[in-house]
Image (cartoon, coloured by chain):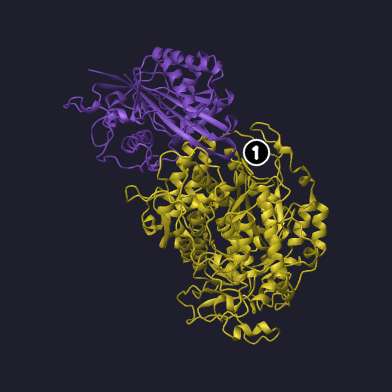
Chain colours: A purple, B yellow
Amino acid sequence: MKLILSTSNIMGGGPSVIRRPTVEKSNTELTSSLRANFAAHQLAPSSTRPPIGIPTAPTRKPLQAWTAQEGSTLYIPALDVSGSALAEERSQYDITVKLFYLPNIPASARCAHTREAIDLVLRSLGVKSIDLLIVSFPGISFDADDSDSDADSPTTTTTTTTTSDPSTDPSAATTPDDFATMQQTWQAAETLHSAGTIGKLGVAEFGVQRLTRFLPLTRVPPAVDQINVRDCCVVPKPLILYAREQRIELLTHNDCTNILPRGTLRELLGPGEKGAAVLAGAAEAAEQGRLKGDVEPLWVVKYTAVVKDRGVVESKGYFAVAELKEE
Amino acid sequence: MSSRPIAPAARPLPFICARRAPLDKQEFLLRMVLVIGTPLDWPEAKKVASHVRSWGIEQLLAIWRRAKGKERDALLWGDEVEYLVVCYDDENHAVRLSLRQADILMSLVLDDTLPDQGGGVSGVQQGPVKALETVPIFHPEFGRFMLEATPGKPWGIGFKDLLDVEHNMKWRRARAKDHMDPTEYPITLTTFPRLGTKDCTTPSYPVSGEMLRSQFVPDEIANPHIRFPTLAANIRFRRGRKVEINVPVFRDEKTPWPFRDPTVDYDLHQWPEDDDVRNGAAKDGCIYMDAMAFGMGSCCLQITFQAKNIAEGRKMYDQLSPLGPILLALTAATPIYKGFLADTDVRWNQISRSVDDRTREELGELPLKNDRWRIPKSRYASNSTYISQDPRLRKEYLDPDLVIDGDLKQRLLDGGMDDLLATHFAHLFIRDPIVVFTEDLRVLDLDKADHFENLQSTNWQHMRFKPPPPGSDTGWRVEFRPMEIQITDFENAAFSVFIVLITRAILSFDLNFYIPITRVSENMETAHIRDAVSSQKFYFRKNPFPSRVGRPANTSDTSSPAAISRPPSPLGPVEDEYELMTINEIINGQQSTEGGFPGLIPLVESYLNSMNVDVETRCELARYLDLIRKRADGTLWTAAKWIRNFVRNHPEYQKDSVVNEIINYDLVKAAETITRNEGRDGLAVEMLGARQ
């Protein structure tokens, strides 16, 4: 079964959005806003929503009451796009989407994921196109101090340590994709670009070497390269020059590449203290309609709609999609 | 987002400052030379006060009717930087205020062809390449030793615009300097440290003139345009005595105690007002000042924003209001008055007293007989109203003792205005118009705003809600007024950009900073305390986040005045919503408590993380945020602390609170050096940090 997790618009969501974002870059925004959205839906009386931040209230609605199943897809919570459309005309917005491919997913599957992700965002915002898609490949991390860090070497393990916490999830120690995989993945995005669904394409955390090798493999070259904000003042000169020459805009971000490790996902959906109890515990039977099985995260997409000439973020949210392998 | 061309076509000055429309050269010259009308003396002006008020209200209603449905205006914003023009006398190790404002302004206007290039040019959609930068605009100010400069056209929210601010400020200063004598320099100290001492201006004039009747400063200290001396004279006249500014003196080791201001002349008999000091106007322990110039001669850093519509403007007005005292304390830069170290750090209350036109009855010193009401605050004071039709605005936040003109409020209500906004303007309109020109009283022109502005722009609160000026495309605006000017353009840009980013975070996250407005006023007082930034706590809301997931689909709905009366859900006591916090906690976040206030800088960074910002811009913004972060946590000093420290460690300082001419000269010179080098030479690193 496929699970589609969503956050709704997190801009009005408060505490889940900001907790000391400067202390460490992390996936806290994703996990806490998912958690808050689950809580808001499963604890609320049918019409109004209570204040968020009540993780373990005694009266939880049964799973069926706050999620929705369509065929073999389960929406957690049920997706309601009626109130999430943008308020003004499409032309007023800059819509940026960042798609996080996760480790160990074959490129062939990613092409379908890309279309799916864009489709969910379009539906959610009530629009027909987005302005910028940034794709984030797993295991790539730009290192400003080491000009060779983006060399295509599977043995380069230092690149992963800053982006995720391997101690909580063994799959986090990821080797970067090879170029053939990236090329194949990119083609799906190029197709959507050609169809007019996406205005510009971008990559994240690419250094000069990686860009140099990647560019010839593309039909629509990246117009954007996102660098972690931590490095914004130490971007090496060669990259600045190369980017200028290739007309690639160097933008900043504050995400980690391995944004949803398997352990984190299990915890989010599990029966524990911080979980939404979508999944049944290991020992218990599948009571109350809870699901049993193993979850594997497939991809995560983040979308942001900014009112252009006012600099106001009107809508921002995530979808995270996983495969439930039922036992 | 990051490479947007500069927003719409030129919309120069009315945007930032409605009452001073851009002048073409000829008009400018005319105004400099000619008197544009006959101002009424106070007894005459008093007679027509109600007349002006009621015409002002009609003009307001006309503006409101025309513009209340104005929608989708872009964010445009502008900063105003004010300068003191000083003149060095190196031979005598002295520095004085230059009173050549008119000459300098004239020279700026006449000099070059640049102003003709302003406007229009840069509106062309050109991508990131900017055409010609629009030349900055200079304005006269109250003090004849002051200049004010604004960008040639408003800024947008394109992040590259934000980076132009500092460069533009430097350009403004360079341009100003280019039109000065070699001995002159435009410095951005809030006040001239020895204003009001003997021989503090050039040229020098005798004190005790007819308009100000000050025993410390000559009439010539004020801008000669008839409006300004009339303003000063009528305030004095209305009040029944001179304005009275007593600042506690900083008591140092050898300060004579009890301190009685040694510069006060008790034997002057030129004007009836000379009796003031014999009647106890000068208070023990205080530096005493007696003229508008001591307050209105201060330099500030003010930011004006255009909102997308009236609802957003009202929201920004409310949400920025509680930030006022915090930014005042954070920008503190005013530790010296009239040649003495003061025991306070900011200018605010001194300006407040320098234009306080309240009578003894209004002040509560005499029983009400001739006047209409007691008025708790000066015309220049912290805000007393909230105006947003926001369900989060609880009745408990409003001032229960707010004074309003009930008749004028009724007129506004009858005209269709909602209660909150009508209350706001009925509060501003309890004042009398101070300067009235006979010529303006003949016909009521509903396509103008002169009578409305007469009251509106002589209510100097720390926020100002500005309706669109008639006959222009400008939208609803909000002005943020509490900040003190900083010595360097780097700092001024940092604070300007910070406030802009805060407004974007407020709107994006739908933040809620409401606390009772009377607490904001208390905070304003707290901000005056010496080193308040490190030593004091301020009332601040604990949880700024909305208590709901998602947001209403259309937040621009403005039309239902009933919205306010509906309490959203059961709410706890208002007192539980806020607590006393340090500036560090407010700016950088409460680290100790889980779920504590997140901090304004983390909120801004979180906003920036949601935006596409290029690396170079983000790096520059990081410099600005870093300055503010470190000012708040005490790593870096405020200008007030730095100046106080400079004086106390000067070899000429006698530990007696006196800032003599030599110290003054060295201090002003140091300020100029700091402006030029911004700490790169090691001077003032305590204030600016190590700069590259």
Residue at coordinates 58% horizontally, 35% vertically from top-left?
A308
**Residue B142 is at least partly visible in this image:** no
| Residue B79 percent across, percent down from the top left | 62, 51
**Residue that label 1 marks:** B7
Which of these two is toward me, B90 or B426? B426
On screen, residue A234 above or below B175: above
User: Against A294, is B629 above or below?
Assistant: below
Q: Where is residue B415, by image quadrant?
A: bottom right
Q: Secondary structure at mark 1?
A: loop
Q: In terms of image quadrants, where is residue B203? A: bottom right
Residue found at the very far left of the displayed protein: A283
Instruction: Examine the rendered structure and indicate whether residue B336 appears above or below residue B59.
Output: below
Q: Is residue B299 placed above or below B562 in the rendered structure?
A: below
Which residue type does callout 1 highlight?
A: Ala
Judging depth in this view, the residue of A303 and A28 nearest the camera is: A303
In the image, residue B44 lies at what x, y percent?
74, 74
- Write the residue at 55% across / 56% down: B420
The answer to whether B83 appears left or right of A66 in the picture is right
Report x, y in % for residue A58.
24, 40
Horizontal relation, residue B349 to residue A144: left or right: right
Mark 1 crowd level (few <14, some 14–19, many ≥20, 10 Å Cα): many
Whether residue A213 is visible here, answered yes or no, is yes
Quadrant of the rendering where the N terminus of chain B is positioned? top right
Protein chain holding label 1: B
